[in-house]
Amino acid sequence: MDERRRSSDSSRNPRRTRSSQNTAHSRRTRSSESLRIRRESGPSKSSRNSRYSGLTERNTTQTTEIRGRREILTPEDLFDDEEYMKRRQERMRKRRLEKLRQQRRRRIMRYAAMAAVLVLVICLAAFGISRLLPDRGGQDSGKVSEEVKADSGTQVTTALSQPVMSAADIGKFSEETTLSGWQSDSSGIWYKNSDGTFYENGWQEIDGNQYYFDENGYVKTGWQVIDGKDCYFDESGKYDSEKVKPMIALTFDDGPGQYTEELLNCLEENNAKATFFMLGQNAEQYPDTVKRMKEMGMELANHTYDHQILTNLSSGQVTEEIEKTSSIIEKAAGAAPTAMRPPGGAYNETVQSVSGFPIIMWSVDTKDWKTKSEDQTYQCVMDNAQDGSVVLMHDIHEWSVKAAIRMIPDLTAQGFKLVTVEELARAKGIALENGKAYYYFGEGTQQVE
Ligand code: NI
Protein backbone atom coordinates (compact mmCIF):
# COMPACT_ATOMS: atom_id res chain seq x y z
CA MET A 1 0.00 0.00 0.00
CA ASP A 2 2.72 2.31 1.08
CA GLU A 3 4.95 1.18 -1.72
CA ARG A 4 2.21 1.81 -4.15
CA ARG A 5 1.82 5.32 -2.84
CA ARG A 6 5.55 5.87 -3.07
CA SER A 7 5.77 4.49 -6.52
CA SER A 8 2.85 6.52 -7.67
CA ASP A 9 4.42 9.58 -6.04
CA SER A 10 7.71 9.00 -7.77
CA SER A 11 6.11 8.20 -11.10
CA ARG A 12 4.18 11.44 -10.85
CA ASN A 13 7.36 13.30 -10.17
CA PRO A 14 10.44 11.37 -11.21
CA ARG A 15 12.67 14.38 -10.80
CA ARG A 16 11.87 14.57 -7.10
CA THR A 17 12.75 10.91 -6.69
CA ARG A 18 16.07 11.43 -8.34
CA SER A 19 16.98 14.38 -6.16
CA SER A 20 15.94 12.57 -3.01
CA GLN A 21 18.64 9.98 -3.67
CA ASN A 22 21.22 12.66 -3.06
CA THR A 23 19.76 13.65 0.25
CA ALA A 24 19.89 10.37 2.14
CA HIS A 25 19.08 12.01 5.42
CA SER A 26 15.80 13.46 4.39
CA ARG A 27 14.87 10.20 2.77
CA ARG A 28 15.69 8.24 5.91
CA THR A 29 13.66 10.57 8.09
CA ARG A 30 10.74 10.37 5.76
CA SER A 31 10.89 6.59 5.54
CA SER A 32 11.12 6.30 9.35
CA GLU A 33 8.17 8.53 9.78
CA SER A 34 6.19 6.59 7.29
CA LEU A 35 7.16 3.37 9.01
CA ARG A 36 5.96 4.76 12.26
CA ILE A 37 2.72 5.75 10.67
CA ARG A 38 2.45 2.28 9.26
CA ARG A 39 2.93 0.68 12.67
CA GLU A 40 0.38 2.91 14.29
CA SER A 41 -2.19 2.59 11.55
CA GLY A 42 -2.33 -1.16 11.63
CA PRO A 43 -0.61 -4.44 10.96
CA SER A 44 1.74 -4.38 8.02
CA LYS A 45 2.61 -7.10 5.59
CA SER A 46 5.72 -8.00 7.52
CA SER A 47 3.88 -8.12 10.86
CA ARG A 48 1.31 -10.41 9.34
CA ASN A 49 4.14 -12.65 8.16
CA SER A 50 5.53 -12.68 11.67
CA ARG A 51 2.23 -13.73 13.09
CA TYR A 52 1.98 -16.61 10.72
CA SER A 53 5.44 -17.85 11.70
CA GLY A 54 4.24 -18.05 15.28
CA LEU A 55 6.11 -15.09 16.61
CA THR A 56 4.59 -11.95 17.91
CA GLU A 57 5.82 -8.67 16.68
CA ARG A 58 6.57 -7.50 20.17
CA ASN A 59 9.05 -10.33 20.90
CA THR A 60 11.52 -9.19 18.28
CA THR A 61 11.00 -5.49 18.58
CA GLN A 62 13.58 -3.20 20.06
CA THR A 63 11.82 -0.13 21.20
CA THR A 64 13.50 3.14 21.92
CA GLU A 65 11.41 5.66 23.62
CA ILE A 66 12.25 9.29 23.81
CA ARG A 67 9.95 11.60 25.70
CA GLY A 68 7.58 13.38 23.44
CA ARG A 69 8.84 11.39 20.50
CA ARG A 70 8.64 7.70 19.69
CA GLU A 71 10.73 5.97 17.07
CA ILE A 72 10.58 2.31 16.31
CA LEU A 73 13.32 0.65 14.32
CA THR A 74 13.47 -3.06 13.66
CA PRO A 75 15.89 -5.27 11.58
CA GLU A 76 12.94 -5.84 9.39
CA ASP A 77 12.70 -2.11 8.85
CA LEU A 78 16.32 -1.99 7.85
CA PHE A 79 15.81 -4.97 5.61
CA ASP A 80 12.72 -3.24 4.20
CA ASP A 81 14.76 -0.18 3.46
CA GLU A 82 17.43 -2.11 1.54
CA GLU A 83 14.83 -4.07 -0.30
CA TYR A 84 13.04 -0.86 -1.02
CA MET A 85 16.20 0.57 -2.56
CA LYS A 86 16.66 -2.52 -4.70
CA ARG A 87 13.11 -2.47 -5.83
CA ARG A 88 13.33 1.19 -6.49
CA GLN A 89 16.44 0.73 -8.61
CA GLU A 90 14.75 -2.12 -10.41
CA ARG A 91 11.71 0.06 -11.07
CA MET A 92 13.86 2.88 -12.36
CA ARG A 93 15.75 0.49 -14.62
CA LYS A 94 12.49 -0.81 -16.01
CA ARG A 95 11.24 2.69 -16.47
CA ARG A 96 14.40 3.65 -18.35
CA LEU A 97 14.02 0.62 -20.58
CA GLU A 98 10.37 1.44 -21.16
CA LYS A 99 11.29 5.00 -22.04
CA LEU A 100 13.91 3.82 -24.53
CA ARG A 101 11.40 1.44 -26.08
CA GLN A 102 8.90 4.27 -26.30
CA GLN A 103 11.45 6.56 -27.99
CA ARG A 104 12.28 3.78 -30.41
CA ARG A 105 8.59 3.25 -31.21
CA ARG A 106 8.12 6.98 -31.82
CA ARG A 107 11.17 7.11 -34.07
CA ILE A 108 9.89 4.15 -36.07
CA MET A 109 6.48 5.75 -36.43
CA ARG A 110 8.05 9.03 -37.55
CA TYR A 111 10.13 7.24 -40.20
CA ALA A 112 7.07 5.29 -41.34
CA ALA A 113 5.06 8.50 -41.74
CA MET A 114 7.88 10.14 -43.69
CA ALA A 115 8.18 7.08 -45.92
CA ALA A 116 4.43 7.09 -46.57
CA VAL A 117 4.51 10.77 -47.59
CA LEU A 118 7.50 10.10 -49.85
CA VAL A 119 5.73 7.20 -51.55
CA LEU A 120 2.62 9.35 -52.04
CA VAL A 121 4.67 12.17 -53.61
CA ILE A 122 6.43 9.73 -55.95
CA CYS A 123 3.09 8.22 -56.98
CA LEU A 124 1.57 11.63 -57.71
CA ALA A 125 4.62 12.72 -59.72
CA ALA A 126 4.56 9.52 -61.75
CA PHE A 127 0.83 9.95 -62.36
CA GLY A 128 1.35 13.55 -63.54
CA ILE A 129 4.16 12.55 -65.91
CA SER A 130 2.08 9.75 -67.40
CA ARG A 131 -0.64 12.32 -68.13
CA LEU A 132 1.85 14.53 -69.97
CA LEU A 133 2.98 11.72 -72.23
CA PRO A 134 1.21 11.48 -75.63
CA ASP A 135 -1.87 9.30 -75.80
CA ARG A 136 -0.76 5.78 -76.60
CA GLY A 137 -4.22 4.98 -77.91
CA GLY A 138 -6.59 3.36 -75.52
CA GLN A 139 -9.52 1.33 -76.72
CA ASP A 140 -11.76 4.34 -77.32
CA SER A 141 -9.23 7.17 -77.72
CA GLY A 142 -8.19 5.75 -81.09
CA LYS A 143 -11.74 6.06 -82.25
CA VAL A 144 -12.40 9.58 -81.01
CA SER A 145 -9.03 10.99 -82.06
CA GLU A 146 -9.92 10.37 -85.69
CA GLU A 147 -9.54 13.45 -87.84
CA VAL A 148 -12.70 15.20 -88.83
CA LYS A 149 -12.96 16.16 -92.45
CA ALA A 150 -14.52 19.56 -93.01
CA ASP A 151 -16.92 20.03 -95.91
CA SER A 152 -14.94 22.93 -97.34
CA GLY A 153 -11.82 20.80 -97.56
CA THR A 154 -9.83 23.66 -96.09
CA GLN A 155 -7.44 23.43 -93.18
CA VAL A 156 -8.78 21.18 -90.47
CA THR A 157 -7.87 21.61 -86.84
CA THR A 158 -8.47 18.57 -84.72
CA ALA A 159 -9.08 19.02 -81.05
CA LEU A 160 -6.25 18.02 -78.79
CA SER A 161 -6.78 15.65 -75.93
CA GLN A 162 -5.60 17.64 -72.94
CA PRO A 163 -4.49 16.39 -69.53
CA VAL A 164 -5.69 18.21 -66.45
CA MET A 165 -3.02 20.74 -65.67
CA SER A 166 -4.12 24.24 -64.79
CA ALA A 167 -5.98 25.31 -61.67
CA ALA A 168 -9.06 25.97 -63.81
CA ASP A 169 -8.87 22.43 -65.16
CA ILE A 170 -8.70 21.02 -61.67
CA GLY A 171 -11.74 23.07 -60.77
CA LYS A 172 -13.45 21.63 -63.80
CA PHE A 173 -12.76 18.09 -62.65
CA SER A 174 -13.50 18.63 -59.00
CA GLU A 175 -17.16 19.24 -59.72
CA GLU A 176 -18.24 15.72 -58.80
CA THR A 177 -17.81 14.49 -62.34
CA THR A 178 -16.73 10.94 -61.94
CA LEU A 179 -18.12 9.50 -65.18
CA SER A 180 -16.64 10.16 -68.59
CA GLY A 181 -18.73 11.71 -71.36
CA TRP A 182 -20.53 15.03 -71.77
CA GLN A 183 -20.22 17.43 -68.84
CA SER A 184 -21.59 20.89 -68.28
CA ASP A 185 -20.83 23.69 -65.86
CA SER A 186 -21.47 27.41 -65.61
CA SER A 187 -18.99 28.06 -68.45
CA GLY A 188 -20.47 25.63 -70.96
CA ILE A 189 -20.40 22.07 -72.22
CA TRP A 190 -17.26 19.93 -72.40
CA TYR A 191 -16.31 16.31 -72.90
CA LYS A 192 -14.45 14.14 -70.44
CA ASN A 193 -12.62 11.15 -71.88
CA SER A 194 -12.43 7.86 -70.04
CA ASP A 195 -8.72 8.44 -69.48
CA GLY A 196 -9.45 11.69 -67.63
CA THR A 197 -8.45 14.04 -70.47
CA PHE A 198 -10.65 16.54 -72.31
CA TYR A 199 -10.65 18.07 -75.79
CA GLU A 200 -9.72 21.62 -76.72
CA ASN A 201 -8.77 23.77 -79.72
CA GLY A 202 -10.42 22.15 -82.67
CA TRP A 203 -12.83 19.83 -84.39
CA GLN A 204 -13.77 16.53 -82.82
CA GLU A 205 -16.15 13.82 -83.94
CA ILE A 206 -18.12 12.26 -81.09
CA ASP A 207 -20.88 9.70 -81.71
CA GLY A 208 -21.05 10.62 -85.39
CA ASN A 209 -21.46 14.37 -84.79
CA GLN A 210 -18.91 17.11 -85.22
CA TYR A 211 -18.06 19.57 -82.47
CA TYR A 212 -15.60 22.39 -82.16
CA PHE A 213 -13.84 22.79 -78.81
CA ASP A 214 -12.46 26.19 -77.84
CA GLU A 215 -9.17 26.92 -76.11
CA ASN A 216 -10.74 26.22 -72.70
CA GLY A 217 -12.21 22.89 -73.73
CA TYR A 218 -15.82 24.05 -74.11
CA VAL A 219 -17.89 23.41 -77.24
CA LYS A 220 -18.79 26.36 -79.43
CA THR A 221 -22.47 27.11 -79.98
CA GLY A 222 -24.40 29.35 -82.38
CA TRP A 223 -22.77 31.04 -85.37
CA GLN A 224 -18.98 30.95 -85.32
CA VAL A 225 -16.30 31.84 -87.85
CA ILE A 226 -13.89 28.91 -88.04
CA ASP A 227 -10.97 29.02 -90.47
CA GLY A 228 -12.74 31.92 -92.20
CA LYS A 229 -15.95 29.95 -92.64
CA ASP A 230 -19.28 30.56 -90.93
CA CYS A 231 -20.31 27.45 -89.04
CA TYR A 232 -23.47 26.85 -87.09
CA PHE A 233 -23.53 24.78 -83.89
CA ASP A 234 -26.76 24.03 -82.04
CA GLU A 235 -27.27 24.52 -78.29
CA SER A 236 -25.47 21.29 -77.49
CA GLY A 237 -22.53 22.23 -79.71
CA LYS A 238 -23.46 19.91 -82.59
CA TYR A 239 -22.27 21.24 -85.97
CA ASP A 240 -25.00 21.75 -88.56
CA SER A 241 -23.37 21.68 -91.99
CA GLU A 242 -26.73 22.34 -93.69
CA LYS A 243 -27.18 25.66 -91.99
CA VAL A 244 -25.62 28.51 -93.95
CA LYS A 245 -25.58 32.07 -92.71
CA PRO A 246 -27.78 34.29 -94.90
CA MET A 247 -25.63 36.75 -96.81
CA ILE A 248 -26.45 40.06 -98.35
CA ALA A 249 -24.45 42.56 -100.33
CA LEU A 250 -25.00 46.22 -99.54
CA THR A 251 -23.96 48.39 -102.49
CA PHE A 252 -23.45 52.17 -102.53
CA ASP A 253 -23.47 54.19 -105.77
CA ASP A 254 -22.33 57.59 -106.97
CA GLY A 255 -19.73 58.25 -104.23
CA PRO A 256 -17.47 58.65 -102.55
CA GLY A 257 -18.94 61.65 -100.75
CA GLN A 258 -18.73 63.60 -97.54
CA TYR A 259 -20.62 60.88 -95.59
CA THR A 260 -18.68 57.90 -96.88
CA GLU A 261 -16.06 57.90 -94.11
CA GLU A 262 -18.80 57.74 -91.50
CA LEU A 263 -20.27 54.76 -93.30
CA LEU A 264 -16.87 53.07 -93.41
CA ASN A 265 -16.53 53.54 -89.65
CA CYS A 266 -19.83 51.74 -89.10
CA LEU A 267 -18.89 48.89 -91.45
CA GLU A 268 -15.58 48.52 -89.66
CA GLU A 269 -17.22 48.42 -86.22
CA ASN A 270 -19.59 45.69 -87.35
CA ASN A 271 -17.02 43.67 -89.25
CA ALA A 272 -19.20 44.16 -92.31
CA LYS A 273 -18.27 44.54 -95.96
CA ALA A 274 -19.89 46.47 -98.81
CA THR A 275 -19.35 47.29 -102.46
CA PHE A 276 -18.83 50.86 -103.69
CA PHE A 277 -19.75 51.74 -107.28
CA MET A 278 -17.83 54.98 -107.61
CA LEU A 279 -17.86 57.81 -110.07
CA GLY A 280 -14.42 58.70 -111.40
CA GLN A 281 -14.99 62.39 -110.69
CA ASN A 282 -15.76 61.72 -107.01
CA ALA A 283 -12.94 59.19 -106.54
CA GLU A 284 -10.63 61.98 -107.74
CA GLN A 285 -11.89 64.16 -104.87
CA TYR A 286 -11.68 61.51 -102.15
CA PRO A 287 -8.61 59.42 -102.93
CA ASP A 288 -7.97 58.70 -99.24
CA THR A 289 -11.46 57.33 -98.79
CA VAL A 290 -10.97 55.07 -101.80
CA LYS A 291 -7.68 53.89 -100.34
CA ARG A 292 -9.29 53.20 -96.98
CA MET A 293 -12.05 51.20 -98.66
CA LYS A 294 -9.46 48.90 -100.16
CA GLU A 295 -7.59 48.55 -96.90
CA MET A 296 -10.81 47.60 -95.16
CA GLY A 297 -11.58 44.86 -97.67
CA MET A 298 -14.45 46.67 -99.39
CA GLU A 299 -15.06 45.94 -103.02
CA LEU A 300 -14.13 48.77 -105.37
CA ALA A 301 -16.36 49.08 -108.40
CA ASN A 302 -16.80 51.32 -111.44
CA HIS A 303 -19.87 53.52 -112.04
CA THR A 304 -18.41 55.62 -114.98
CA TYR A 305 -16.63 58.94 -114.68
CA ASP A 306 -19.56 61.39 -114.65
CA HIS A 307 -22.71 59.28 -114.56
CA GLN A 308 -23.40 59.14 -118.27
CA ILE A 309 -26.26 56.89 -119.45
CA LEU A 310 -24.11 54.45 -121.42
CA THR A 311 -26.84 53.28 -123.76
CA ASN A 312 -26.73 56.76 -125.29
CA LEU A 313 -22.99 56.57 -125.97
CA SER A 314 -20.87 54.99 -128.63
CA SER A 315 -18.76 51.99 -127.88
CA GLY A 316 -15.64 54.17 -127.75
CA GLN A 317 -17.25 56.64 -125.33
CA VAL A 318 -18.41 53.81 -123.08
CA THR A 319 -14.88 52.43 -122.99
CA GLU A 320 -13.46 55.85 -122.18
CA GLU A 321 -15.97 56.41 -119.31
CA ILE A 322 -15.08 53.10 -117.80
CA GLU A 323 -11.31 53.09 -118.31
CA LYS A 324 -10.83 56.63 -117.07
CA THR A 325 -12.62 55.77 -113.83
CA SER A 326 -10.73 52.51 -113.36
CA SER A 327 -7.38 54.28 -113.57
CA ILE A 328 -8.47 56.91 -111.01
CA ILE A 329 -9.55 54.21 -108.56
CA GLU A 330 -6.39 52.21 -109.16
CA LYS A 331 -4.27 55.29 -108.62
CA ALA A 332 -5.99 56.05 -105.30
CA ALA A 333 -6.28 52.54 -103.92
CA GLY A 334 -3.43 50.73 -105.60
CA ALA A 335 -5.93 48.20 -106.93
CA ALA A 336 -8.24 48.14 -109.92
CA PRO A 337 -12.02 47.83 -109.56
CA THR A 338 -13.53 44.37 -109.96
CA ALA A 339 -17.06 45.13 -111.12
CA MET A 340 -19.12 47.84 -112.83
CA ARG A 341 -22.66 49.14 -112.68
CA PRO A 342 -24.02 51.27 -115.52
CA PRO A 343 -25.68 54.54 -114.35
CA GLY A 344 -29.46 54.17 -114.18
CA GLY A 345 -28.96 50.44 -114.66
CA ALA A 346 -28.98 51.10 -118.40
CA TYR A 347 -26.96 48.64 -120.46
CA ASN A 348 -27.15 47.05 -123.87
CA GLU A 349 -25.09 44.63 -125.93
CA THR A 350 -22.50 47.31 -126.69
CA VAL A 351 -22.03 48.07 -122.99
CA GLN A 352 -21.80 44.36 -122.22
CA SER A 353 -19.19 43.75 -124.89
CA VAL A 354 -16.88 46.63 -123.94
CA SER A 355 -17.35 46.95 -120.15
CA GLY A 356 -14.58 44.53 -119.28
CA PHE A 357 -16.32 43.79 -115.93
CA PRO A 358 -19.19 41.74 -114.60
CA ILE A 359 -22.26 44.02 -114.72
CA ILE A 360 -23.76 44.12 -111.24
CA MET A 361 -27.41 45.17 -110.95
CA TRP A 362 -29.55 44.80 -107.80
CA SER A 363 -32.48 42.90 -106.33
CA VAL A 364 -33.58 45.46 -103.72
CA ASP A 365 -33.93 49.07 -104.85
CA THR A 366 -34.39 51.28 -101.80
CA LYS A 367 -35.21 54.30 -103.99
CA ASP A 368 -33.40 56.35 -101.37
CA TRP A 369 -32.58 59.10 -103.89
CA LYS A 370 -36.33 59.50 -104.43
CA THR A 371 -37.81 59.12 -100.92
CA LYS A 372 -34.99 61.09 -99.27
CA SER A 373 -36.10 59.30 -96.12
CA GLU A 374 -33.81 57.59 -93.63
CA ASP A 375 -36.71 55.60 -92.17
CA GLN A 376 -38.06 54.38 -95.50
CA THR A 377 -34.61 53.43 -96.68
CA TYR A 378 -33.95 51.54 -93.46
CA GLN A 379 -37.36 49.82 -93.51
CA CYS A 380 -37.08 48.80 -97.15
CA VAL A 381 -33.88 46.91 -96.46
CA MET A 382 -35.08 45.37 -93.18
CA ASP A 383 -38.28 44.16 -94.87
CA ASN A 384 -36.68 42.70 -97.97
CA ALA A 385 -33.22 41.49 -96.98
CA GLN A 386 -32.80 37.80 -97.67
CA ASP A 387 -29.99 35.43 -98.49
CA GLY A 388 -28.43 36.50 -101.79
CA SER A 389 -29.92 40.02 -101.91
CA VAL A 390 -28.04 42.86 -103.58
CA VAL A 391 -29.22 46.13 -102.02
CA LEU A 392 -28.95 49.46 -103.87
CA MET A 393 -28.29 52.69 -101.94
CA HIS A 394 -26.33 55.92 -102.46
CA ASP A 395 -23.65 57.06 -100.03
CA ILE A 396 -23.76 60.64 -101.30
CA HIS A 397 -27.00 61.23 -99.37
CA GLU A 398 -26.97 61.90 -95.66
CA TRP A 399 -30.29 60.07 -95.06
CA SER A 400 -29.00 57.02 -96.90
CA VAL A 401 -25.85 56.85 -94.82
CA LYS A 402 -27.87 57.34 -91.62
CA ALA A 403 -30.20 54.51 -92.66
CA ALA A 404 -27.19 52.32 -93.45
CA ILE A 405 -25.63 53.05 -90.05
CA ARG A 406 -28.86 51.83 -88.44
CA MET A 407 -29.37 48.75 -90.58
CA ILE A 408 -25.79 47.40 -90.51
CA PRO A 409 -25.82 46.41 -86.80
CA ASP A 410 -29.47 45.34 -86.99
CA LEU A 411 -28.95 43.03 -89.97
CA THR A 412 -25.86 41.59 -88.28
CA ALA A 413 -27.88 40.96 -85.13
CA GLN A 414 -30.50 39.13 -87.20
CA GLY A 415 -27.78 36.74 -88.34
CA PHE A 416 -27.03 38.25 -91.75
CA LYS A 417 -23.51 38.29 -92.99
CA LEU A 418 -22.78 41.51 -94.85
CA VAL A 419 -20.40 40.77 -97.70
CA THR A 420 -19.16 42.24 -100.95
CA VAL A 421 -20.75 41.22 -104.25
CA GLU A 422 -17.64 39.27 -105.13
CA GLU A 423 -17.79 37.36 -101.82
CA LEU A 424 -21.51 36.73 -102.20
CA ALA A 425 -21.06 35.27 -105.69
CA ARG A 426 -18.17 33.08 -104.52
CA ALA A 427 -20.14 31.85 -101.51
CA LYS A 428 -22.95 30.83 -103.86
CA GLY A 429 -20.57 29.09 -106.20
CA ILE A 430 -21.05 31.58 -109.01
CA ALA A 431 -18.07 32.51 -111.17
CA LEU A 432 -18.66 36.08 -112.31
CA GLU A 433 -18.11 36.70 -116.02
CA ASN A 434 -17.26 39.98 -117.71
CA GLY A 435 -20.15 41.54 -119.63
CA LYS A 436 -22.72 39.38 -117.91
CA ALA A 437 -25.40 41.05 -115.73
CA TYR A 438 -26.20 39.78 -112.21
CA TYR A 439 -29.15 40.83 -110.07
CA TYR A 440 -29.52 38.39 -107.27
CA PHE A 441 -27.53 35.48 -105.81
CA GLY A 442 -30.13 33.73 -103.68
CA GLU A 443 -32.58 30.93 -104.38
CA GLY A 444 -35.58 31.75 -106.57
CA THR A 445 -35.93 35.33 -107.67
CA GLN A 446 -36.08 38.74 -106.03
CA GLN A 447 -36.74 42.09 -107.55
CA VAL A 448 -37.86 44.85 -105.20
CA GLU A 449 -38.55 48.10 -106.98
NI1 NI B 1 -25.86 56.07 -110.12
Image (cartoon, rainbow, N blue to C red):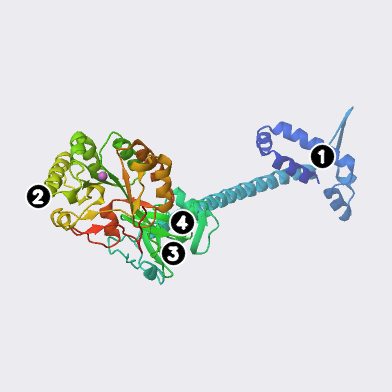
Residue under label 4: 119
**Amino acid type of the residue tagged 2 in the rendering:** Gly
Measured as percent of width and height from the top left, residue 337 is found at 18, 48
Numbered disc 4: secondary structure? helix
Measured as percent of width and height from the top left, residue 434 is found at 17, 57
418 and 326: which is toward the camera = 326
The disc, 4 or 3, on the residue closer to the chain's N-terminal end is 4
Numbered disc 3: secondary structure? loop
Residue 35, numbered circle: 1
Mark 4 burial class by Cα count in 10 Å: few <14, some 14-19, many 20+: few
**Amino acid type of the residue tagged 1 in the rendering:** Leu
Rounded to the nearest angstrom, the CA distance separating label 2 from label 3 is 74 Å
Rounded to the nearest angstrom, the CA distance separating label 4 from label 1 is 61 Å
Count of labels in the image: 4
**Amino acid type of the residue tagged 4 in the rendering:** Val
- Hey, which quadrant is residue 5 in on the image? top right
In the image, farthest residue toward the top: 68
Rounded to the nearest angstrom, the CA distance separating label 1 from label 2 is 148 Å
Residue under label 3: 195
391 and 90: which is toward the camera = 391
In the image, farthest residue toward the front: 312
Foreground mark, 4 or 3, reads 3
The disc, 2 or 3, on the residue closer to the chain's N-terminal end is 3
Is residue 251 left or right of 116 when viewed as pictured? left
Residue under label 2: 316
Measured as percent of width and height from the top left, residue 323 is found at 12, 46
Rounded to the nearest angstrom, the CA distance separating label 4 from label 2 is 92 Å
